[in-house]
Image (cartoon, rainbow, N blue to C red):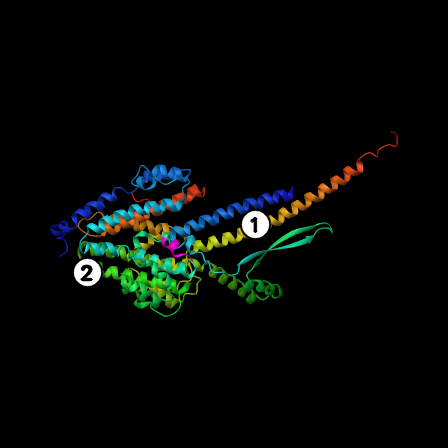
């Protein structure tokens, strides 16, 4: 029964909730970002980050630094924290934490398959994979020629196996059907995660439903915008949208037929939570749309911490860290390219 | 001086086009994620170049040949501009050329996926423009060097003409 989690949650989840709230207080603040935005070189960024929780991860990196090095080392911090929480978690929290990483697993599978199609070395591809999405037999993906083999040889023993039922074909893998596979897998994953959270019930279900619905809606908008001018048909586009969210089902019907950004805007402005996002954009502008969505997401993720005794704080923390790493990547790119005037275009403040 | 001014203007234009292209690429990576836009996805299969540079020797004023650079696109597109030259009044043929160019561009970007950010397409356009500017710079430089050679030769001739004829007295 919702409202009585306070009686039993701390038995199994109290320690880890305290841990994740401690981690949350280590997120970079606005003054940290202001200092970072004024850096002249990547070594300056390293020096400023040495005073934060990223310090131990960057201190041994030799100069000259690269943007990708900063991102990789900062990601390692998130991975260490996640693995500690996962090893300490009991069911159902451990399954919940694993669900949080399936998105990265899908990205890694697609990276290996695409890279192999382009005749790249598997070791090189493995180094580019996200550490949160690694699994034991990932290197074997390189031998598969079509999706049926992909499933039969490798993925049948992974958590992604149930998501493959909708995209198993014997067609050889190419760029288009890999993209369809990526989006179909992600759709199935989001729907499965949503159902899992609904089964958990209580505050976890309520808060995660809101966060996952937002994710599904954002995906629908991005798929619509990115498929404009491509060979993806309206029917195929419609099939990639998730079967939940604020836009389901009528918003999806309208988005499926949009031919430009202004039509997408026209659809989204009918939904009050998204009116404010699109109101910030001038007509035809797509660059600020990503930032507007990220800002809205961060607002919702921070609100998850306002309530206790639920699992959504773990999901929120992982997403906030990923946003922080995206911010650091953007700041590093602007500094490396000597484009400091553009640094505030994509930085999303968390606090 | 006009040539030098044009040359410097082109260099400036190249620099700003490339900066915009790199920034658009960074924005696309921010939007799509670092795993979707990285060097490990570049296609190592052997395939013909989408664009190549052709060097012709151009006779200038019947004097020394001056190299002239031009861009050649892949064979599918190369035939289309010839079609458009013959039928420029027909808007249908022009639309076919544009469609073909869009398809070629989409094909080149497909290594990053088919549902890509508009910023990645903008980055591709910037780098294409930069390539065209580079060819213009090469031609401008070639013309400037050729003019410099001609001026230097004329000055050498004039110097030879003005040298006093040595007298017969010893």
On the question of residue B54 being in view, the answer is: yes
Q: Residue at x 58, y 66 (%)?
A: B90
Name the residue nearer the viewer: B51 or A119: A119
Which residue position is annotated with label 2?
A: A199
- Residue under the image location 24 percent in, 44 percent down: A23
Characterize the magenta stretch by its predominant secondary structure. Answer: helix
Q: Is residue B99 left or right of residue A52?
A: right
Q: Are marks 2 and 1 on the same chain?
A: no
Report the quarter where the N terminus of chain B lies.
top right
Check disc 1 and report its element: helix, strand or loop: helix
Q: Is residue A38 visible?
A: no
Q: Hey, which residue is sitting farthest bottom in the picture?
A: A170
Q: Position of residue B159 (x, y in %)?
A: 77, 37
The residue stretch that appears in magenta: A120-126
What is the chain letter for disc 2? A
- Could you tell me residue B156's position as x and y percent? 75, 39
Checking the image for residue A257, the label placed there is none
Mark 1, residue position: B134
Element marked by disc 2: helix
How busy is the neighbourhood of tag 2: few (under 14 within 10 Å), some, or many (20 plus)?
few
Spatial separation of the CA atoms under disc 2 and disc 1: 61 Å
Tell me which corner region of the image, top left, top right, bottom left or bottom right, holds residue A25. top left
**Percent position of residue A226, x then y:** 40, 59
């Amino acid at each position: 029964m919702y409202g009585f989690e306070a009686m039993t949650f701390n038995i199994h989840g109290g320690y880890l909730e305290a841990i994740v709230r401690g981690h949350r207080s280590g997120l970079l603040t606005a003054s940290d970002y202001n200092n970072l935005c004024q850096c002249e070189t990547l070594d300056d960024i390293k020096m400023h980050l040495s005073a934060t929780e990223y310090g131990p991860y960057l201190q041994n990196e030799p100069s000259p630094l690269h943007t990708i090095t900063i991102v990789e080392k900062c990601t390692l911090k998130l991975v260490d924290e996640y693995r500690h929480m996962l090893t300490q978690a009991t069911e159902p929290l451990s399954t919940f934490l694993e669900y949080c990483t399936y998105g990265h697993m899908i990205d890694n599978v697609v990276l290996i398959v695409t890279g192999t199609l382009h005749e790249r070395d598997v070791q090189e591809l493995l180094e580019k994979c996200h550490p949160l999405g690694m699994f034991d037999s990932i290197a074997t993906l390189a031998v598969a020629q079509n999706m049926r083999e992909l499933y039969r040889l490798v993925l049948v023993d992974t958590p992604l196996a149930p998501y493959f039922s909708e995209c198993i074909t014997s067609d050889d893998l190419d760029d288009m059907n890999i993209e369809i596979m990526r989006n179909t897998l992600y759709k199935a994953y989001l729907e499965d995660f949503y159902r899992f959270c609904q089964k958990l019930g209580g505050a976890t279900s309520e808060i995660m439903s809101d966060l996952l619905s937002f994710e599904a809606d954002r995906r629908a908008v991005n798929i619509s915008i990115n498929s404009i001018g491509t060979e993806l048909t309206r029917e195929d586009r419609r099939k990639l949208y998730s079967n939940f969210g604020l836009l389901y089902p009528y918003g999806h019907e309208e988005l499926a037929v949009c031919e430009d950004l202004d039509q997408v805007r026209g659809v989204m402005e009918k939904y009050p939570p998204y009116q404010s996002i699109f109101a910030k954009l001038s007509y035809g502008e797509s660059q600020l749309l990503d930032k507007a969505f990220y800002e809205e997401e961060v607002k919702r993720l921070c609100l998850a911490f306002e309530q206790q005794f639920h699992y959504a704080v773990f999901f929120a923390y992982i997403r906030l860290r990923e946003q922080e790493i995206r911010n650091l990547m953007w700041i590093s790119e602007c500094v490396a390219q000597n484009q400091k005037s553009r640094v505030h275009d994509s930085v999303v403040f968390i606090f | 001086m006009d040539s030098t001014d044009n040359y410097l203007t082109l260099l400036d234009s190249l620099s700003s086009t490339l900066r915009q292209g790199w920034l658009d690429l960074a924005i696309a990576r921010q939007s799509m994620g670092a795993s979707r836009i990285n060097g490990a996805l570049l296609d190592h299969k052997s395939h013909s170049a989408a664009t190549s540079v052709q060097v012709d020797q151009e006779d200038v004023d019947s004097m020394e040949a001056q190299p002239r650079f031009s861009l050649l696109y892949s064979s599918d597109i190369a035939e289309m501009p010839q079609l458009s030259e013959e039928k420029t009044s027909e808007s249908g043929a022009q639309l076919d050329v544009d469609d073909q160019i869009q398809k070629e561009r989409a094909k080149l970007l497909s290594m990053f996926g088919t549902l890509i950010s508009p910023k990645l397409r903008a980055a591709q356009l910037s780098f294409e423009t930069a390539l065209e500017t580079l060819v213009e710079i090469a031609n401008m430089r070639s013309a400037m060097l050729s003019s410099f050679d001609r001026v230097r030769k004329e000055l050498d001739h004039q110097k030879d003409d003005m040298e006093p004829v040595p007298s017969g007295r010893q």
